[in-house]
Image: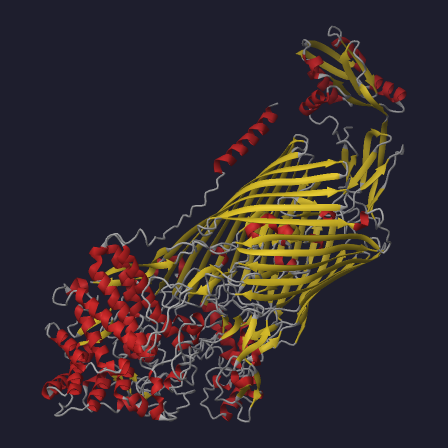
Amino acid sequence: MMKMKTYKIFIVVACASLIGVSCTKLDEVTYGKLSPTTYYQNETEALSSVVGVYSLMANFYAAGGDGWRIGEYGTDELFCPGRASGGWYDGGVDQIMTHKCTADNGRMVTAWSTIFQEIGAANAVLASLQSSPKADSFKAMIAEIRALRAFGYYRAMDWWGNVPIFTAAKVDATNLPKTNSRADVYKFVVDEFTAAAADLPSITTITKASYYPRFTKETVYTALAEVYLNAKVYAGVDHSSDCLTMCNNVINTGQYALQASVGACFLATNENNSEVISAFSVDPAKGVGGNQYILYAQPALDQKKYGLGFGPANGYCFDKTALNRYETGDARLKLLEYGPQFYLDGVTPLANTSGVQLNLITLVDPTRMAAADNEGFRVLKYSPVGATFTSYNANNDYIMYRYSNVLLMKAEALLRLGQDASTALTLVNQVRQRSNCTPWTDLSLTKIEEERAREFIWESSRRSDMIRFGTYFTNTWFFKQNVENPTSDGWRGIYPIPAIQLTNNPNLVQNPNY
Amino acid sequence: MKMYRIILGDKGSWSKKMRIMKLTVILLLGSFIAMSATTYSQNTKLNVSSKNASLIDIFRNIEDQSEFYFYFNKEDVKSKEAVSVDLKDAQINVILDQVLSNTGLEYKIIDRYVVVKEKGAPDPAVTMQRVHKVAGKVTDSSGATLPGVSVVQKGTTNGTLTDSNGNYSFGSVSENATLVFSFVGMKSLEVSIAGKSSVNAVLVEDSFGIEEVVAIGYGTMKKSDLTGSVASINSDRFQLGSGLTPQQLMKGSISGVSISQNSGKPGGSNTIRVRGGTSISASNEPLYVIDGVPISTSAGVSSSKLSSTTDYFDEEPVDPLSSLNPNDIESINILKDASSTAIYGSRGANGVILITTKRGKVGKTQIDYNFSTGFSTASKQLDVLSGDAYRSIVNKLGLVLDDKGDNANWQDRIERTAATTSNFVSLTGGGEKSNYRVSLGYSDQQGIIKGSDVANFNSRINLTHTELDGKLKIDVNMSYGQQSTDQAPVSNTVGSEMGSSILYEAYVFNPTYPIYDAKGNYYNVPPYRVNPVSYTDELLDNRMSTKFLGNISASYNFIKPLTFQVNGGYNVNNIDRNSYISKNNLLGNGYNGYVSMQKLDDYSKLLETILKYNQKFGKHAIDAMAGYSYQYFYDEGYHEGASGFLSDAFKWYSIQAATSIEIPTSYAECNKLISMYGRANYNYDDRYLVTATLRRDGSSRFGSDHKWGLFPSAALSWRISKEQFYKSNVVSDLKLRTSYGVTGSQEIGNYNSLNTLSASSSGYIVGGQKITIVMPSQYANPDLKWEETAQADIGVDFGLLKDRIRGSLDWYSKKTSDLLLSIDVPSPSYISKQIANVGSVRNSGIELTLNADLVRSKDFGWTAVVNVSHNSNKVLSLSNSKWVGKNMQTAPCQGQGLSGSYAQLIMPGQPLGTFYGKLFTGFDSNGLEQYANNGASQVIGCAQPKLSYGFETTFSYKNWSLSMNFHGTEGNDIYNCTRNNQAYLSNLPGRNVFVEAVTSGVSRTQAKVFSSRFIEDGSFLRMDNLTLGYNFKTKNTFLSNARAYVSAQNLFCLTGYKGLDPEVNSEISGTGTAPLGIDYLSYPKARTFSLGINVSF
């Protein structure tokens, strides 16, 4: 009888337990995930997404990032040849270097996503901040996001010209964005920058130590100066006078000054450097980014020279075209590696295990499939000296705008406007003399272009400079020996829209001739 | 003296039975009653001594010391006063006369049976039957004795088992009784005693038994009653050999089910497709149900990789069945059509694989021990330039050669002859109420690439207990398995140059290099060419995966046609994955020792209640069930990376020794599935069979607008051969089936319908302080729901020549709509992909299976099973009103110089797996590739086979048996991406090339291009298994069974394919579901020879 009871109890308990857990509720428990409709309740929460957009924009400047690379490939100062020893070489870069880029190019694909992901992120964060009940207290941050987005569009306009202007938080698949003309995008960028500058704090009002490296009014003025300087290319209208105004806005704060050397701007200690107008923070020890320029560009023997924990990959280099621009004694040559290499003492030869000293020579074979390891000169702006490495990630902040750029832009604007030649000359000589170059007595656009090339080598400025000055199409150099018809190749001034984007969005229009 | 006493059982239940039966006693009267009765009752001397004992106690006392049995009405006896008695060496009548003297009771002795009743009450005997003794021997058709055969008197619970010599005996059965002989794997036999005292039985094997019972999900069914398409394979047809996974046991054996190993890697996963893939972006894996518990294959542990800044360690998923020992599997049933799978509703669309494990059985304890050992070698190597050939071509091209003088084949240097052993022991037994099976298995398998191996430990306990005369049945199954793998880093997920894989390096590394330099260090070619052999000891990738699965099920047949069942299940999986790159290895350049540690855990719990109804009314039979189930899934993961170690000794054992620790990452997710379901089977006279099924599923994964889905199905079958008018000697059995139903696939991931923000693993520094980054992680899609598959099936089951040949032929067509596509969100968007229900795909095909019992004589037997299937797949649409899906590029080409190209295009009108690219027409005089149509892309192949087939046959002669398994495909193409990387001279001199690069005449200036040049015919015929077995004679030994075998796996593969193996599914990162027919740096397939012994005692 006892056993019988036990079974009954068992059955009853089983049924009861069943009723207890029986339910038809399907609520989701979202561990560790937040909802955009309830988050953004204070400035700290808002800032956590604003910095996310900064972090995406920092990718434009990363050495391995296509944001930086396609702003330099195709010019006369950045090459990445194949190495006979089997080193690193990315497919597709040859197309860009030889001005034969196609819509299938893999680097275009990733560059486009880098840029438009940043724009999309800015759109999403902007919409959330604007719809937050605390939106009024986010005014400066909303301006920051608009500036970040405008910067993304500025890059997109520079590289692809005709791109869709889209500002909603999310793309509606049934109403896809449409291509806007480059002139429209130009106007959008100028308007957005202008609106953002109004609400952003000035360098004169913030506490640099706690605000760095967020955007100030002056960051946006510098960006606007650059956009106006290139307005002829983007919109067919000269805006040199607006460029001049913007440059003066920056200069007149009195907060910026040239450093004793260009290299000082790129050291690991470059935070709050008085020449730096804008930068992106990097601190791999804290898990925040990593500066990998030395990994990508330098010859493997630099491991010994700088006592690195890794062997650099011997990738990016430049050839005699760019090297020959520098006059003997130019201090900026110290940022370049060429000829016989020595240890940091400058006398001990940097030699391999067989005792052969590394002697960097210019590139030899334009078929580029098998460059020797010592071919090609290198730029080493982000010095490993004094940097802290986490594996191959250094902690030098990425530089976006330096004061010397504002000085040279102002000089160029004055020259283009035909105004105040002596001020222009003084500004250029200010930059030249800082690097121990002979002061000039007169100026020309060609001279300014060359000075910019010397000053900003590998700072992602050369491509738009060459296009503005026209040399991108008319000159020939190592990988661009045979331009089919230099004068008709103006269409190469904008890159093709990646084919995959045209597939995803049939409203987009491919750029002419691609 | 005591016979097997089911009649009385234990005293408690006997009394109870008496009460229930209301004294309807069956008395057994012997034919020689007069003699034996008097003899026994007179000759048996009893000692009874008790004070104030109840009558029942005294009766029990007598029963205990004799063969007497008492029959009485408990109520009559219980009410009597206690008595005292003290008698020695007394006859039973003396004792009973004294004991019953003042009770008003009388007794009657009939043989050994004593009936006690109220004086004057009518005789209780209802059926007077004669007591009869019977004994005999049970053998199989070959004359071998069968121990452990159950022999039961029909209509009673009176039964016994044959002993080790096949003998049985009954002390008393009625002389006109029928005995039922039954034994697993044999057809039951009923024999009428008809007065005989010796009855021998010969049982025949139930090899292609139409009465076979198959699992159908939430129940079982006689195979002959099936209305749907269910394929089943029992353990006797499993392939034998070392290192086999559960999936490989049935490889090639089931029509419409393709099983391919993703690589030859030990512990690697398999790709299983039931009737073609229905989904593009979501999982195409079938649902696995082990002993009634559905197993999630989509939780984190199935992918085994959380996040890492290094790409060196691959992402091959963990086999969901890795904790199952093949020796524990009794049968595998595969539900294919919608009628069968609809009972699993939103998880049924890709087919359901039901695995039933072996259980204990009534009888004496049996110990089984299985041992096998074997060795494997790589079945093929790729044709890479030797050191001498490399030297010659590099010099000829006038390139700078870094010649270290060797003439190497690096594949030889990383491969080995790999050993495998496995041990398995099980203990089985049971009594009338309970039975058990306990097993332990351990196996150790080396990979053919140095540095890779796997060790499996599995344990299992299966218990069954019945009570209340079998009305209450409790099943307990528990299994625990541990799989420990060391993986050679063979990541084929790396598109960039750095840290590709051991295999890539073995194909490209300079063949003039020795392994070691003069100082004994590995030769490397910085910055990117890592010595292949250094991977085998300087890179560690250990994965420990443990799985627990337990379930308890209780079913109670509380009133005749109704049974109530409760089933609770719990499944826990963990993965600990620890990887390390040594300080010296070039791959860890800059890390100075790099550790990656990750832990992934998931669990699911299941509660089901089912009410079953089973009743016959004349020729009508109804078998119906209705149930409710709740299943909850949780998974979480944690990853940590660290670098900068003083010594290689620290590794993950002491990450506090690291100078730099990455920001750890973690996640947790859960989902719920709530279901109600019902099924009714109606059977009229075994001629007309109807099944209707309905399931309603609700999942937390579905969007707010579609929380619940309804999945109906119906099926009808007609057993023509049972009709009166049916007369055919050739076609002995004939059944027509048809079914239609709707099922779903809910593998859409968690939270994909919600708008969410997540913390990023990086941050940003403002004013020197780190700020956490929170960004959108998912856009809302309230429309998100399951993929829906509507499937129609028409089939015929037939038996020819008295069922010597049995077969099934099925035609099916299934349309999957609301396809889950990971749609590229058009830019600008922070989130690049979004899951949405878009588009549709159709699969249709024909399947044929034939089982032939060709020769069945005393000494010689020959059986064969053939299956052939054809599936055609077509993408119907990639758009709907809300979402615009475009032709989707998939299968990104991998390797240096090829990134940015895609091998496949998914587009309406073409099958999934369509290769799309330039059509290669040859080389021009300059050695440059030429393409048709000015290089415009076009369809250049398809990864889906036109035909898949399998063939297995077994010959047996006396104690010998020889079995063979083959399978193959016809008409499928493979993209040989490895070849695309290495058939170009542009690799030289930094990377070695295939011989083809030299012989094809390709120019050195020809860049690598994806074209039809690398799309190859993947048709093949493989001999999967060849086994020669011998059964030892175990008569008069302590063994009850002994078998030895030798087997060869993958003995040959006939194919024109130039890669390592035509059965390949390279996992390529960023593609979700692995695209079909892509071969990139696949782990070589092994050819294995094994020796095994199975003994039972």
Above or below A406: residue B161 = above
Above or below A468: residue B854 = above
Is residue B588 shown left or right of residue B468?
left
Q: Nearer the viewer, residue B173 or B256?
A: B256
Above or below B913: residue A474 = below
Assign the N terminus of chain A to one quadrant of the image: top right
Q: Residue B218 appears in which quarter of the rendering?
A: top right
Residue A273 seen anywhere in this rendered image of the structure: yes
Residue at position x 81%, y 15% in the image: B123
Residue at position x 86%, y 26% in the image: B130
In percent of width and height, residue B937 lies at 52, 79
In percent of width and height, residue B221 lies at 69, 45
Residue at position x 50%, y 38% in the image: A22
Q: Residue A440 appears in which quarter of the rendering?
A: bottom left
Is residue A24 shown left or right of residue A4?
left
In percent of width and height, residue B469 lies at 68, 31
Is residue B211 shown left or right of residue B296?
right
